[in-house]
Amino acid sequence: MSGFDLVCDVACEVGESPVWLRESAELLFIDVKGRRLHRFDPGRGTLTSLAVEEDIGYAAPTRSGAYVAALRSGVWLLDETGRKRRCLANNPGDPATSRFNDGAIDPHGRLVIGTIDETKRQGSAGFYQLGRRGLVELAAGIMTSNGAAFAPDGRTLYHSDTPRFVIYCSDYDPATGESRNERVFARLTPTEHDRGRPDGAAVDATGCYWSALYEGGRVQRYAPDGRLLAEYPLPVLCPTMPAFGGVDLKTLYVTSARRDGSGGGLYALAVDTPGISATAFDEETLA
């Protein structure tokens, strides 16, 4: 296993939300502040981009071939061109100081999604599941919701509160969508010289949790019991989120944010353990 390589110098302001699209062999990812949906084809080395109307914190494919996107104003269905088609849920906070952020899709196609308290003072963000009853709160009092991911069997749900340096996990029933027994999975300790904190995440086929450390310049791999197994450095300070891709799901892609003139590109690392295939969002989970 060698180091990370820059595979797409896209210069995102805040790159996020990578998702491997198996059918087209492309990586979907976003630029939060740049308001872009990107699709990277590693085989051709090409990038196509769509503009969206608002800051975008998360995006994923839908089973109908479009996109579900978490924007500042709410969770929306976007068409193939990135235009708003239908609002699925409004932002439960004040859009002037809050927006939707990181999310994940469970094995049955349900969306879990978090928000961010941009004031960084009140801890008014939350972590939600979107379903028939709209947004159902799974966790409250959060500063910045991140790190959403599911275990391979769907029975463990992870999320993090980035400014508080904590990753949580809970028991999850993929059949009903019920989440319970939330507990601390891992807690990081910042130092004067290391402010690396848990941002976006992915889970591999063995159930290990991979967390990008914002301002930490590395990705950490945790065992299912919360033990830190390994760290993988990147050549940028602010990695934001990993995702497994490639034909064999053994390429770890990592998005990044631009800081002090560097970062914002897409990086890749060949790994020994494959990831798990992404699940598309199913609009029927709202019916």
Image (spheres, rainbow, N blue to C red):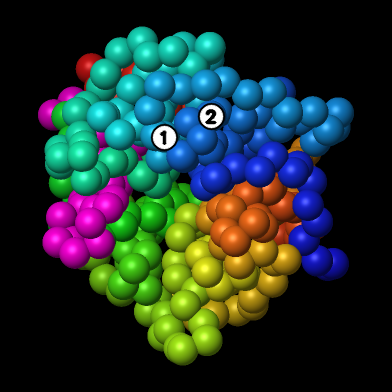
> What residue sits 64% from the left and 75% below the top?
231
**Badge 1: few (under 14), some or many (20 or more) residues near its Cα, within 10 Å?**
many
Return the residue found at the far bottom: 192
Residue 230 location, x and y as percent?
Answer: 64, 77
Q: On residue 36, which mark appears?
A: 2
Return the residue at label 1. 56
Which residue is found at the position 52% from the left and 21% from the top? 51
Secondary structure of residue under mark 2: strand
Q: Let me know if residue 155 appears in the view.
A: yes
Q: Is 89 rendered above or below residue 271?
A: above
Membership of 43 in magenta stretch: no
**Residue positioned 55% across, 28% down in the render:** 37
**SS assignment at label 1:** strand
Picture coordinates of residue 83, whole percent (x, y):
44, 13
What is the magenta range?
109-133
Mark closer to the chain start, 2 or 1: 2
Please state the horizontal and vertical placement of residue 259, each as a whole percent of the image. Answer: 57, 59
Pick the quarter of the image with the N terminus: bottom right
